Amino acid sequence: MNINLEWYRIFLYTAQSGNLTRAAEELHITQPSVSYAIKQLEAALGVKLFDRLSKGVRLTAEGASLFVFVEKSIAFLEAGEQKLRSLKDLTAGELRIGASGPIIKHVLLPQLDLFHAEHPDVRIRLAQGKTSEIRNRLKEGQIDLGLVHLPLYDEALDVSPLLAIQDCFVVGPAFKKYSEQVITSEQFIQIPLLLLTPGSSTRGFVDQWLISQGLEAEADIELSSMDMLIELAERGYGAAFVTESFVKQELEQGKLFRLNSDKPIPTRTIGIATRRNTSLSLIAQRFIELLNKNQA
């Protein structure tokens, strides 16, 4: 005979209350249903679990032995149910997300601030890396979603666009004169170039753009941090290749100046990447909804 898990719950309440009627009231079922469940459980196990008394019931020796295990098991299941309710209500759990440094600072952090304020009990796990590194972490299950530069082609991932970005070269006051005219691609290589280190999607993009202009310029300074490129551009070390919206404040304050190329730099797209054929947690789903809503 198959044992119904609910019979164990009824057994537990009956043992704790010592009364069939009281157990039925606590379980919000009828007394005959409690009696039936106890009889079915006894039949399935082949032992007597309760002695019937004039004013209730009392565990037999076998029933008392079973009670120890049932009590722990039901408590464990109820804790699991409570955990699921917490995850559903976003009052527990964690959000595992990855992105590059500039995307974290300028795209992700404003949305994380909103999410954290709304769901302070959700633990934030944030991993920084290049798009290639974020892709690998996703495939290995280390993170739930990643913000990456597109295009990104991988059969193991689902990728959807989030927002378009425009890149540009910026200089500090020392090279301001170049910002006051339309300059050719050839003129770009006459200015010291400050670029991200090879291997990043941003470096690959600017290298391809220069090649498309018939140029193969060498970077004078290569750094892994876009913030450091911006800092060196302000100090007059050359032209840094950055995302325009990431230096909006510096441009408005006159700390940096945008170079205008006679051949426009194409826009790029930042997208959201997740593992294909893998259900997202409710927390990850909620954060993606927030991202899409605030970038629309």
Image (spheres, rainbow, N blue to C red):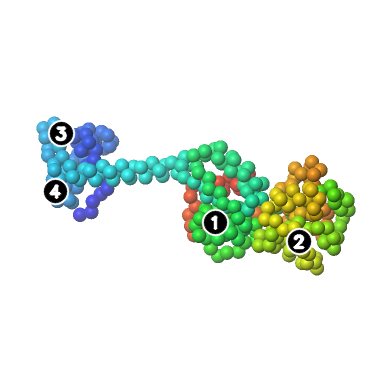
Residue for point 65% across, 54% down: 270
Residue for point 75% across, 58% down: 221
**Dot 4: within a 10 Å radius of its alpha carbon, few (fewer than 14), some, or many (20 or more) residues?**
few
Q: Secondary structure at mark 2?
A: loop
Q: Secondary structure at mark 1?
A: strand
Quadrant location, the N terminus: bottom left
Indicate which disc residue 104 carries: none
Give percent across and percent down for residue 206: 74, 61
Indicate which disc residue 56 carries: 3
* Of the pair 200 and 9, the residue shown nearer to us: 200
Tag 2 residue: 219
Q: CA distance from mark 3 to mark 4?
A: 19 Å
Mark closer to the observer (1, 2): 2
Give percent across and percent down for residue 79: 35, 42
CB-based contact (under 8 Å), mark 1 and mark 2: no
Q: CA distance from mark 1 to mark 2?
A: 33 Å
Give, as a three-letter code, the residue at label 3: Gly
